[in-house]
Amino acid sequence: MSVRVKTQPLTAEAFAPFGDVIEASGSVDKLINQGRCERYHNRAKLDFVDGEAGISIFKSEVFSLPLSIEMMERHPEGSQAFLPLSNKPFLVVVAPDEGGKPGAPLAFITNPGQGVNYHRGVWHGVLTPLHEPGLFAVVDRIGTGPNLEEHWFTEEVILHE
């Protein structure tokens, strides 16, 4: 038996229980650089138990839908933000926590230019770009000690449009 999950567009409201949508939308917070640059200020909350924020570059293989996922992960010691370095959409998979394991997954497709910040401890899928080059800046916790929990599904989970 398999679980089928239909993708939906990523919106701040639908994603709020899991994290922040990072995008240049809504009212501009500040004009900077002699009025030539709009600043959308403080769009995500970084949250770390210890350690510090670091910026890494991830380069991932590209995926396509429908997609079978086998595993979800979470980071109990820190939030994790994914910022695409191209103007291409990507797939975001999250799930509520149900007794220490992921509940029913939700799948979102970002709009071009959107990034996400997963709150600390949120179950999420692996980085899943849908287009080349699959290149992302990732802001997350750099520190000692374990910060990764994985859950492997016993039944097939299929994501589809």
Image (cartoon, helix red, strand yellow):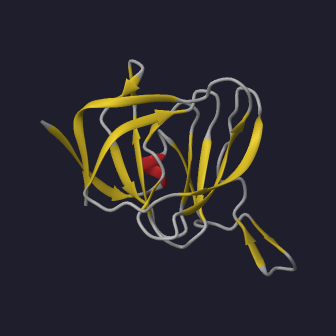
Horizontal and vertical percent for residue 60? Answer: 51, 58
State which quarter of the image contains the C terminus. Answer: bottom left
Horizontal arrangement in the rendering, residue 37 relative to residue 100 (left or right): right
State which quarter of the image contains the N terminus. Answer: top left
Count of numbered circles in the view: 0
Residue, far left? 1
The quarter of the picture where residue 33 lies is bottom right
Q: Residue drawn 58% across and 63% down?
A: 23
Is 25 located above or below residue 100 in the figure?
A: below
Q: Residue drawn 62% across and 38% down?
A: 79
Is 68 located above or below residue 9 in the figure?
A: above
Horizontal and vertical percent for residue 158? Answer: 24, 47
Q: Residue drawn 64% across and 33% down?
A: 78
Horizontal arrangement in the rendering, residue 44 relative to residue 10 (left or right): right
Horizontal and vertical percent for residue 160? Answer: 24, 56
Horizontal and vertical percent for residue 81? Answer: 61, 49
The quarter of the picture where residue 53 lies is top right
Horizontal arrangement in the rendering, residue 67 relative to residue 75 (left or right): left
* Nearest to the observer: residue 104 or residue 45: 104
Horizontal arrangement in the rendering, residue 146 relative to residue 110 (left or right): right
Residue, far top? 99
* Nearest to the observer: residue 61 or residue 116: 61
Q: Residue drawn 16% across and 39% down?
A: 2
